[in-house]
């Protein structure tokens, strides 16, 4: 009973019922007030020509032998007679009695009708509140049953457009995003475990098999190089995972960053010769050509994370380029950083997949310089942390490759998504 009394349905019932009863009571009071003002004169006019207990019509003789004459106003200056005053007093008494009887009957009937109206109003209010709150109950029950095993379920509320329909649709949209995040998290954890397990298995195999027995110095040197390479790859993977986690948390503080100068610095580091640099395993003459168009561009953000963003874009552009290809880097005053590279042809449907962690254009072969598949996902995470929009699209033939644009807010203000001010 206590739960019922403290439910939203009971509160809405009390509200609706009270409003309806007040409206009914106000209507009854208004009718009584209006009748009290005009009922007396109307009753008096109706009986003013009739004496109590004497049913007469115009022209009929009265008991004293005189003819019945309707009431008329006395001429000015003429005083009423004793008989006229007596008749007026009797008529007044009849009018007052009729008025009081009519008002009493009206009050009793009105109160009975109001009582019945109040009962009906409360019942209608209870039924209406239940109908209105039924979608809320559906949403509540669905939210109570949600878990990681049934995130695919949706409310799918059917009904006319309204606040509750929008609430249910918003809840369904939130479930879509939650399901996507949970799925991505599970996939990320599984891929991370696989990526970390592989180098550990390689190290173990190298130690147990390669160093078994009494290996010679040359074999020990090869195994040592192999173990160091696997350790370096594992260290790079762990650092990438940590960087991805840090960028997902948002920014601790922001400051003006000259993105054009930062891109120029990263280009100088990636291409020491000033124009080209070979990807791992490539000859120097097969290195891509650099095309730069760095217009002044200053954004608000974290300089270290933005450096990682530019560095990962350049590394991805070099690693997935073709022999003698091209890397183009540009900044614009409109707040856009663009990095484009030639390379293998990429299907447009595969581009969004490349922005997910541990996703590559081809299956991993665990070769030197291959990377862990975290570069573009780290770029996307850093862009989100800076409130920037990341757009990636495949280049048409014959160049192929990928073009990545990071559109930063031109006039960043407080409260940008992903930014925490200190």
Image (cartoon, helix red, strand yellow):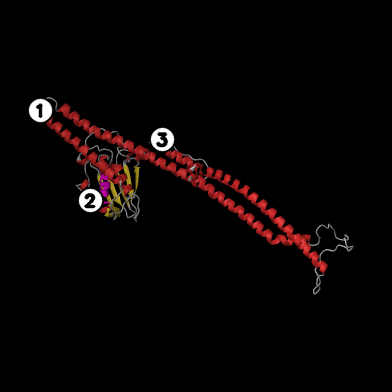
- As for residue 59 lying within the magenta part, the answer is no
Above-or-below relation of 415 to 154: below
Discs 1/3, front: 3
Q: Earlier in the sequence, mark 2 or mark 3?
A: 3
Local secondary structure at mark 3: loop
Structural distance between the alpha carbons of marks 1 and 3: 58 Å
Residue visible at 32% across and 55% down in the picture: 333
Residue 335 appearing in the image: yes
Structural distance between the alpha carbons of marks 1 and 2: 46 Å
Label 2, residues with CA under 10 Å away: few <14, some 14-19, many ≥20 = some
Q: Nearer the viewer, residue 124 or 293?
A: 124
Read off the magenta span. Answer: 302-314
Above-or-below relation of 259 to 353: below
Label 3, residues with CA under 10 Å away: few <14, some 14-19, many ≥20 = few
Q: Earlier in the sequence, mark 1 or mark 2?
A: 1
Q: Earlier in the sequence, mark 1 or mark 3?
A: 3
Q: How many marks?
A: 3
Local secondary structure at mark 1: loop
Residue assigned mark 1: 216
Residue assigned mark 2: 265
Please name the predominant secondary structure of the magenta segment in the image. helix
């Amino acid at each position: 009973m206590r739960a019922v009394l403290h439910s939203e349905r009971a509160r809405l019932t009390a509200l609706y019922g009270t409003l309806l009863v007040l409206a009914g009571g106000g209507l009854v009071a208004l009718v009584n007030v209006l009748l009290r003002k005009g009922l007396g004169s109307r009753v008096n006019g109706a009986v003013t020509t009739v004496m109590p207990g004497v049913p007469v019509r115009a022209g009929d003789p009265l008991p004293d032998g005189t003819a019945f004459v309707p009431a008329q106003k006395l001429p000015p200056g003429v005083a009423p007679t004793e008989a006229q005053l007596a008749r007026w007093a009797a008529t007044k008494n009849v009018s007052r009695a009729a008025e009081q009887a009519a008002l009493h009957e009206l009050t009793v009937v009105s109160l009975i009708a109001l009582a019945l109206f109040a009962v009906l109003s409360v019942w209608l209010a209870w039924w209406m509140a239940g109908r209105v709150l039924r979608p809320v109950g559906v949403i509540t029950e669905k939210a109570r049953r949600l878990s990681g095993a049934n995130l695919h379920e949706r409310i799918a509320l059917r009904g006319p457009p309204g606040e509750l329909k929008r609430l249910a649709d918003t809840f369904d949209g939130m479930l879509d995003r939650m399901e996507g995040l949970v799925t991505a998290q599970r996939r990320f954890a599984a891929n991370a475990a696989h990526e970390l397990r592989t180098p550990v298995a390689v190290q173990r195999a190298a130690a147990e098999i390669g160093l078994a027995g009494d290996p010679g110095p040359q074999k020990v040197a090869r195994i040592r190089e192999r173990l160091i390479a696997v350790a370096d790859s594992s260290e790079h993977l762990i650092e990438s995972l940590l960087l991805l986690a840090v960028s997902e948390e948002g920014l601790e503080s922001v400051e003006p960053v000259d993105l054009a100068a930062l891109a120029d610095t990263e280009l100088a580091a990636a291409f020491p010769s000033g124009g080209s640099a070979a990807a791992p395993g490539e000859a120097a003459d097969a290195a891509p050509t650099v095309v730069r168009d760095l217009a002044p561009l200053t954004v608000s953000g974290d300089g270290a994370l933005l450096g990682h963003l530019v560095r990962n874009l350049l590394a991805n552009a070099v690693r997935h380029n073709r022999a003698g290809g091209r890397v183009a880097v540009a900044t614009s005053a409109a707040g856009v950083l663009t990095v484009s590279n030639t390379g293998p042809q990429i299907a447009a449907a595969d581009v969004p997949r490349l922005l997910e962690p541990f996703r590559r254009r081809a299956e991993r072969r665990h070769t030197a310089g291959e990377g862990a598949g975290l570069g573009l996902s780290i770029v996307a995470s850093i862009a989100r942390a800076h409130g920037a929009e990341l757009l990636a699209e495949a280049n048409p033939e014959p160049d192929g490759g990928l073009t990545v644009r990071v559109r930063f807010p031109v006039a960043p203000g407080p409260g940008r998504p992903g930014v925490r001010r200190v």
